[in-house]
Amino acid sequence: MSTLGKASGALKSVDYEVFGRVQGEGRGYTEEEARKLGVVGWVKNTSQGTVTGQVQGPEDKVNAMKSWLTKVGSPSSRIDRTNFSNEKEISKLDFSGFSTRY
C-alpha cells in the first residue's frame, strides 16, 4: 500500500464527525466505500450518537470520501451535517487499510 499515494501526488489526512441518524449499519458501508475508493483510516460510533473517524490517502480520493460522508452515507442513514478537522498533507499513510474501531 505504500505506493498508493505516490502516483496521485500529495497524501492527505482528515478527521471527520458525522451528525444525524448515522449509527447502526453505517460503519460497514463506510468501510466498503473507503476500500472502493482506495483510502485508509478508521470509523467508530461515539457515545453522543455520531460517527467519527479519520481518512487518509491521495487528495482526490480523500475528497471523494469526504463527499460520500457528507452527501451519501449508508442507505439507512440521515446525514444532518459532517464536520472535518485537522486536514493536512502527510508524507506517508498511518494505516494499511480501513477498519471499524469499538
Image (cartoon, rainbow, N blue to C red):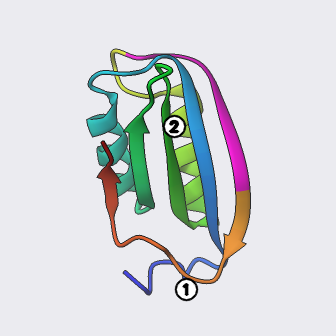
Kindly check if marks 1 and 2 are in contact, taking CB atoms under 8 A apart as contact: no
* Residue type, numbered disc 1: Lys
Viewer-closest of 58 and 43 = 43
Residue 16 location, x and y as percent? 59, 42
Residue 13 location, x and y as percent? 61, 62
Q: Disc 1 to disc 2, how far (Cα)?
A: 23 Å
Q: Which quarter shows the N terminus?
A: bottom left
Rendered image: mark on residue 6: 1
Please say if 8 is above or below 17.
Answer: below
Viewer-closest of 33 and 14 = 14
* Residue type, numbered disc 2: Trp
Pointer 1 or 2: first along the chain? 1
Q: Residue at x 72, y 55 (%)?
A: 86
Magenta highlight range: 77-86
* Magenta stretch holds residue 62: no
Label the magenta part by its dominant secondary structure.
strand
Which element carries disc 1, helix, strand or loop? Answer: loop
Rendered image: mark on residue 68: 2
Rendered image: mark on residue 48: none
Q: Residue at x 34, y 15 (%)?
A: 76
Q: Residue at x 49, y 46 (%)?
A: 53
Which element carries disc 2, helix, strand or loop? Answer: helix
Q: Which quarter shows the C terminus?
A: top left
Is 58 on the left or on the right of 23, as rendered?
right
Is 65 on the left or on the right of 3, as rendered?
right
Q: Quadrant of residue 11?
A: bottom right
Q: Residue at x 41, y 52 (%)?
A: 42
Q: Residues within 10 Å of mark 2 (few under 14, many from 20)?
A: some
